[in-house]
Amino acid sequence: MKEALYYKKLKNKVVNCNLCPTNCVIKPGNFGNCGARKNVDGELFSMIYGKPVSVNVDPIEKKPLYHFFPGSYSLSVGTLGCNLHCLHCQNYDISQAKADGFSVNEVMPEEIIETALRNNCKSISYTYNEPTINYEYVLETVKLARKKGLKNVMVTNGYINIEPLRDLYPYIDAANIDLKSIDGEFYKKICSVRLNPILDAIGEIKKSGTWVELTNLIIPRHNDSKKQIEKLVLWVKRNLSDRVPLHFSAFYPTYKMLDEPRTSDKTLIMARRVALDTGLKYVYIGNSSLNGAGDTLCPKCRKLMVKRDWFKVSSNKISGNLCPYCNEKIEGVFE
């Protein structure tokens, strides 16, 4: 374990964690809401420091990031716990576990760097569970990665306070942020958190210079109406850019939402059409076998730039961030 950053000591050995907007007040011997940070005799400690439960080599497209070194590989690292409690979480076995529920071997940041380099990875992705709650481990690792020429990727729910965000994101090259809905009631009911801090964080991450892509998981009967999609897309266009890639992903029944149906192809196609008609330039469909769902097209001439089959890139015609047919700029970070 390692003493946590961003907390205050209160009376009677109680501590106040200030890492995420939940701002937990934690009594001695108790964990915070995330299940990863614990009050040990009046001091707050990360109980998951150096304890990843999953380390894998993944295509960067799996994050998903489609405009960040397409076709490259990323070392994916995940731990236990989460500061959200989504009823539909795909990784609930680790995200909803407390740090004292598993016994894992320590893997120090230096070992993560060595593993990434040994496997010819272009980047390291902090993913699977919410990487924010493992802040100390992530911060040390991203600094070492930078020195070794590796890129850093956050796959995040965006639920982080602004001060720790500003200290971390100068070292983050790309982020895929889950924007689960633009409806505050959805976040309250399905995820047990507030929406506004997430919107604030997304804007701050975009301003930091980090390359940003967004994912919206469409859950039937909860956030799948045309009106909800229109509202979300308009927020992205007005507050970020019409050139921020947006991934609409298909839901399948899991965890505490086993009775909900899988997202239909019809709904996914509708969402993509709404986003394109609103003016977004890069819109994708994930977790689906629909033809062309992951292809990148030039926003001007609409010719094929990057051909994908699920997470595999079969062709990439982007050269120097430009379309070879009409010379239009293709936003992203490319070789």
Image: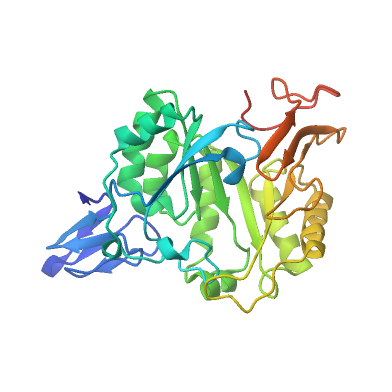
Q: Position of residue 258 (x, y in %)?
A: 59, 76
Judge whether 326 appears above or below 260 on screen.
Answer: above
Relative placement, left or right, of 184 versus 261 is left
Can you see residue 83?
no
- Identify the residue shown where x is 36% and y is 29%: 114
Relative placement, left or right, of 136 versus 242 is left
Q: Position of residue 31 (x, y in %)?
A: 26, 66
Relative placement, left or right, of 238 versus 101 is right
Relative placement, left or right, of 22 versus 61 is left
Residue sitting farthest toward the bottom? 259
Q: Of 270 and 243, which appears nearest the observer?
A: 270
Q: Position of residue 105 (x, y in %)?
A: 27, 48
- Identify the residue shown where x is 61% and y is 29%: 333
Quarter occupied by the C terminus: top right
Q: Position of residue 285 (x, y in %)?
A: 73, 52
Judge whether 205 appears above or below 199 on screen.
Answer: above
Q: How is the image coloured?
A: rainbow
- Identify the residue shown where x is 51% and y is 29%: 122
Q: Quadrant of residue 41?
A: bottom left
Q: How many marks?
A: 0
- Identify the residue shown where x is 39% and y is 33%: 115
Q: Quadrant of residue 325?
A: top right
Can you see residue 126?
yes
Q: Of 39 and 163, which appears nearest the observer?
A: 39
